[in-house]
Image (cartoon, rainbow, N blue to C red):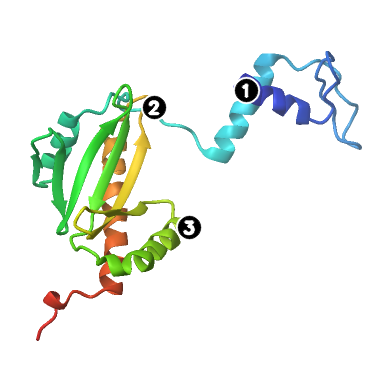
Amino acid sequence: MSSFVDRFRRRRPGAAGRGGAVRRGAPSGRGPARTEPVSDAELHDEVAALLARELGVAEPAQENPTPVTPARIAAWMTANEFSYFVDNDGDLGGLWRGRLFYFFLFGEKSEILQVRGQWHREVSIDRLEEVLDICNEWNAERIWPKAYLRVRDNGRVHVVAEVATDLEHGATDEQLSQTLFCGLSTGSMFFDSLDERYPDPAGSAP
């Protein structure tokens, strides 16, 4: 707040130069100028009133952020009636609209939550550059998810969507829910666009 107050003070009409006291001045024609200094407390109240008017009054938080753990992610899956599994490496995953998604925690303190999805179809190596252009176009126009390709040893190409969020200070249940839904929903939007671009013959009647 102090840096904002300093900027606010410098921008106020009648603010003195370096080391000078801030003084109030009345507009021309509205009476004599007031020359008494403005205290820090008064300035703080004015800034608070300005922020409240522009941004609205902040409501007190109902809960404090807590560290994100695999158990919290699993509890969120259960609460939303999503099926999930834990693989042999201990990673948590699940199916969302027929696509496989994993939920990872990276970083020194496991503070980075990553929601990573994989398109349920493979791409021929012959279409590598074509699909790569689609991913680059998506990344240039949208924030989420990050789209990229992985080439397997067998030459098949997998399309991946990823949303990573730094939750160093933890997250409330609501914040965690928004982050997980963001990863799942935006990843699904990208995969839906691929389905439209490359219709699956198995999904059409003969």
Picture coordinates of residue 139 (x, y %)?
43, 56
Which kind of residue does numbered mark 2 sit on?
A: Pro
Considering every residue shown, the one lying at the far bottom of the view is 206
- The answer to whether 176 appears left or right of 200 in the picture is right
Which kind of residue does numbered mark 3 sit on?
A: Ala
Picture coordinates of residue 173 (x, y %)?
25, 33
Look at the picture and state if 103 lies above or below 161: above
Which kind of residue does numbered mark 1 sit on?
A: Asp
User: Residue visible at 31% across and 30% down?
Assistant: 171
For the residues bearing labels 2 and 1, Cβ distance under 8 angstroms: no
- The answer to whether 177 appears left or right of 19 in the picture is left
- What residue would you read off at disc 2? 60
Disc 2 from disc 1: Cα separation: 19 Å
Picture coordinates of residue 20 (x, y %)?
85, 15
Based on the displayed image, in which of its 4 quarters is residue 55 positioned?
A: top right
Q: Earlier in the sequence, mark 3 or mark 2?
A: 2
Based on the displayed image, in which of its 4 quarters is residue 122 positioned?
A: bottom left
Based on the displayed image, in which of its 4 quarters is residue 66 positioned?
A: top left
- What residue would you read off at disc 1? 45
Q: Earlier in the sequence, mark 2 or mark 1?
A: 1
User: Residue visible at 24% across and 36% down?
Assistant: 104
- Quarter of the picture containing the C terminus is bottom left
Disc 3 from disc 2: Cα separation: 37 Å
- What residue would you read off at disc 3? 140
Look at the picture and state if 48 lies above or below 138: above
State the SS at label 2: loop
Look at the picture and state if 17 lies above or below 151: above
Picture coordinates of residue 179 (x, y %)?
31, 41
